[in-house]
Image (spheres, rainbow, N blue to C red):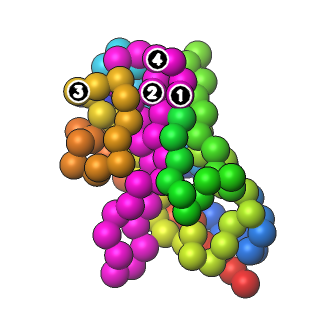
Amino acid sequence: QVQLVESGGGLVQAGGSLRLSCAASGRTFSRYAIGWFRQAPGNEREFVAGISWGCGIGVHADAVQGRFTISRDNAKNTVYLRLNNLKPEDKAVYYCAARTSSTLPTVVASDYDYWGQGVQVAVST
């Protein structure tokens, strides 16, 4: 079992920044990957970024490349997603997810076994 708790969402103006956190507990942290996904109303859940817990290699979707950065702090069992230069189209509920079958992240939501409750990000113009 893996428990994931997100925090850090909120309302910011366009161009602003947020840092989302995903605190993990339960199963050994070095043996699975973490992904961040987002879902806007009426849209499917889409991949944002992912990181291998063991080696710390992060990957980012093209839509957020250069603006968002995923990182992890093993000592705190926490993965972060830094959101810079936010745009109105970034508004969504953001979820972190754990993929326990592999240490490498994928862009496919169904590859992940455990999900957090989600955190809202809203961007005003």
Residue at the spot x=60%, y=24% of the render?
Answer: 73
Residue at the spot x=27%, y=41% of the render?
Answer: 112
Secondary structure under tag 4 reads loop
Mark 1 and mark 2 in contact? Answer it, CB < 8 Å.
Answer: yes
- Asked whether, in this view, residue 23 is left or right of residue 29, the answer is right
Query: Farthest residue in the bottom direction?
Result: 125
Q: Which label's residue is closer to the chain start, 1 or 3? A: 1
Label 1, residues with CA under 10 Å away: few <14, some 14-19, many ≥20? some
- Asked whether, in this view, residue 85 is left or right of residue 53, the answer is right
Mark 1 and mark 3 in contact? Answer it, CB < 8 Å.
Answer: no
Query: Farthest residue in the front direction?
Result: 62
Give the residue type at disc 2: Ser
Decide if residue 122 is in sight here: yes
Give the residue type at disc 3: Ser
Q: Which label's residue is closer to the chain start, 1 or 2? A: 2
Q: Which mark is residue 94?
A: none
Q: Quadrant of the C terminus?
A: bottom right
Secondary structure under tag 2 reads strand
* Residue 116 to residue 30: above or below: below
Q: State which region is magenta.
A: 30-57
* C-alpha distance separating marks 4 and 2: 6 Å
Q: Which mark is residue 52?
A: 2
* Residue 25 to residue 14: above or below: above
* C-alpha distance separating marks 4 and 3: 13 Å
Give the residue type at disc 1: Ile
Say which residue label 4 marks: 54
Residue at the spot x=40%, y=67% of the render?
Answer: 39
Say which residue label 3 marks: 101
Mark 4 and mark 2 in contact? Answer it, CB < 8 Å.
Answer: yes
Give the residue type at disc 4: Gly
